[in-house]
Image: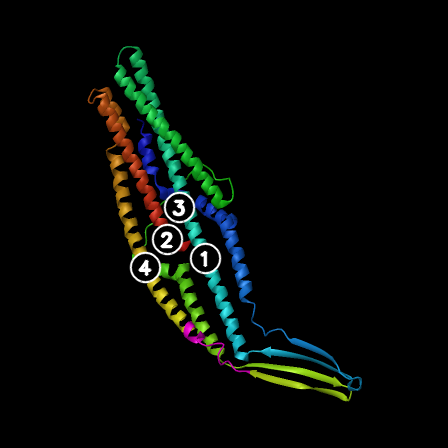
Amino acid sequence: MKLTYIILLTCLSLAGFSQTNLDKFLDLVEQNNQELIAARQFLEAEKAGFQTGLTPDNPSIEYGYFPGSKEEMGTKTTYGISQAFEFPTVYSVKKKLANNQSRLSELDYQVFRQNKLLEAKLSFYNYAFLLKKKQEYQKRLEHSTQLLQSYQTNFDKGNTSILDLNKAKIQNLKIKSSYQILLTEIDNAQKDLTLFAGTDTIEQKTQNISEFALPGLESILAEFQQLKPEIRYLSQAQQVAEMNIQLAKQNWLPEFEIGYEAEKEPDGTYRGLHAGLSLPLWKNKNKLQHARAQANFKTQQLKSRIAVLINEKEKLYFQVQELDQIRQEYKQTLEDAANVTFLDKALRLGQMSVIEYFNELTFYYETIDSYLEIELAHAEALARLTSYKL
């Protein structure tokens, strides 16, 4: 086979997909993905909801008309307006709590957004992997077709057996079938990207860029804990729980009511102010205990989740390192030792039989497929490791 196999293998790196293309794709996902659009709308609705109930209740207006049972009694008319309100410091705590809840909802959206972008990024890598595989299969199909034509010509001239010709036909059929199945997979993968990005302008092409060096584990863990939305979400949830404790304490303060009333009778009119006090003896029972229990749970949940996430990142980090080492070994081996040209030459010189040739060719193709699978696994693991940057 031509030297282009070796050139191709040196370029077959999933980390080499155009970062510009990937960034543009993720921008489209963030702008057009229907799930993200719905999540943003839900976020705005939640934030608006948190700003309700921060003011006193509506004022109450009363009017009464009471005709006397006897004509000489005349008619009594009453009217009044009153306003109930909680202890003044309650409104300040409620406002702070509402702001913290809004921030919590924003972080909840960020968690969803990051997961959706990671899902889209992995789909992009899978699509790019299939396109790389398509390039390889096209080479195989071209080589197999040329080989079949050569065997057919030699068979027509009586220079080869029907068994050898049939082996070439079977090999060509297997590669054709694999190629057709691959085209279907590419079409389905492209539809997935279209669904993610809300556009059907995803191009069937890839570009290569240089790979970046993997930072140290400590650096990744430090940046991860600072940027990871889920950790910030849990930390914010802890703050909300602490604010709920403050609010529960405030609810034990009395509520007030003031108003103006008037009563008109045949003999004259009475006017004046009235004031009332509501003592929270039973309504808020156990609310403070419940708020404290919730805060303790959120604190423990934060600690537990951080430990789990750090453990996952550490395992991913070493997985990326291991896959990268295997990937490099495969690449070097294929460049140094594996070459279809060598197989073709050995077959022409009679150094191997036809059956040995096709067995070696199949093994060679399987090795390249394994290399590509490792490339994809490495890219996916790296994407998950650095997902906090999305």
Relative to residue 252, is residue 48 depicted above or below?
A: above
First in sequence: mark 3 vs mark 2: 3
Q: CA distance from mark 1 to mark 2?
A: 15 Å
Which residue is found at the position 31% from the left and 17% from the top? 150
Q: Residues within 10 Å of mark 3 (few under 14, many from 20)?
A: some
Q: How many marks?
A: 4
- Of helix, strand and loop, which one carries label 2? loop
Between disc 1 and disc 4, the foreground one is: 4
Query: What secondary structure predominates along the stretch shown in magenta?
Result: loop
Amino acid type of the residue that numbered disc 3 sits on in the rendered structure: Leu
List x then y, in percent, for residue 320.
30, 49
Is disc 3 placed on a helix, strand or loop? helix
As drawn, is 36 to the left or to the right of 171? right
The residue at the point 51 percent across, 68 percent down is: 98
Q: Element type at marker 4? A: helix
Mark 4 = which residue? 308
Q: Are marks 4 and 3 in contact (CB under 8 Å)?
A: no
Q: Which residue is mark 2?
A: 386
Q: Amino acid at mark 4?
A: Val
Amino acid found under the numbered disc labelled 2: Thr
Instruction: Find residue 222 and report its image quarter.
Output: bottom left
Task: Give the magenta part as a residue range.
Answer: 278-290
Residue 7 image position (x, y, % from top left): 33, 34
**Which residue matches tag 1?**
110
For residue 122, the mark is 3
Please determine whether, in this image, residue 364 is positioned above or below residue 377. Answer: above
Residue 56: x and y in percent read: 59, 74
Indicate which disc, 1 or 4, sits on the residue closer to the N terminus: 1
